[in-house]
Image: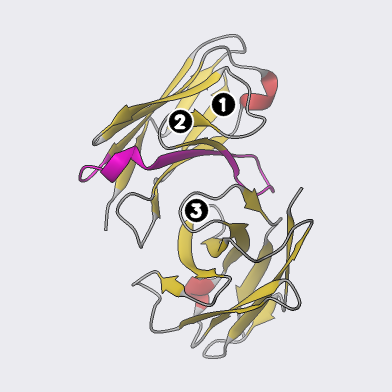
Amino acid sequence: QVQLQESGPGLVKPSETLSLTCTVSGGSISGSYWSWIRQPPGKGLEWIGYIYYSGNTAYNPSLKSRVTISVDTSKNQYSLRLSSVTAADTAVYYCARGGWSFDFWGRGTLVTVSS
Amino acid sequence: EIVLTQSPATLSLSPGERATLSCGASQSIRSSYLAWYQQKPGLAPRLLIYDASSRATGIPDRFSGSGSGTDFTLTISRLEPEDFAVYYCQQYGNSPPTTFGGGTKVEIK
């Protein structure tokens, strides 16, 4: 059974860069697409972007100028960087397997943007 | 970008009743690439249905999906206590970006 676990700071200051890592266990990161999805408190889901294990990426146009997703196959991890954050970026951030539908999800990590 | 509208926003039903949730798209979704997720408080979403009508692994057969084009439905034939949750539809036929609906909360009446 594939398991995903997000890790990273829970508090980020405005204008700084949010950085999260997703560690995949129970299976290889190779051969699949991997996404980041976020959910502001009490609100719906927003897809941020995906990466293929080979490094190909696609991003939500609404965030594209601020997002970078990278992969480290040797560590079975992939990462998210979101620059110039504001309070509107406060959300639970999920990593999930898939580039279209998402069959395995991490538990999510709350990232708060505040000074 | 395709906008998905879910209705109703809240559905109040009793255990054992049938639940019908709707998801409407602002334009036709290619190849019925639509999924449904269940989310309980504090937990990640769980994939229920993909490609509009295919059940994900381990999902009970009381959950079924149907529809095509711009109109899709998730049906729960007989509500169990553990089915009370928020449900989201998601389209991936016209992506990126994939988009989600705003959710339907199924609550105990």
Marking on residue B107: 1
Residue drawn 29% across the image and 50% down it: B3
Disc 3, SS: loop
Residue drawn 56% across the image and 90% down it: A16
Return the residue nearer the eye: B98 or A19.
B98
Disc 1, SS: strand
- Whether residue A74 sits left or right of residue B75 in the image: it is right
Residue A45 horizontal/vertical position (percent): 49, 54
Residue type at tag 3: Lys
Residue A8 horizontal/vertical position (percent): 72, 77
Residue drawn 56% across the image and 26% down it: B107
Identify the subunit bearing mark 2: B
The quarter of the image holding the N terminus of chain B is bottom left
Residue type at tag 1: Glu
Q: Which residue is mark 2?
A: B10
Residue type at tag 2: Thr
Q: Quadrant of residue A70?
A: bottom right
Q: Look at the numbered discs 2 and 3 and tell me whether their residues touch, using CB distance below 8 Å.
A: no
Return the residue nearer the eye: A52 or B43.
A52
Indicate whether A44 appears above or below B107. below
Q: Which residue is mark 3?
A: A43
Q: Alpha-carbon distance for marks 3 and 1?
A: 17 Å
Q: Quadrant of residue B14?
A: top right
Q: Where are the magenta residues, as a range?
A: B25-47
Disc 2, SS: strand
Using a 10 Å C-alpha cutoff, classify the residue at mark 3 as few (fewer than 14 neighbours), some (14 to 19) or many (20 or more). few
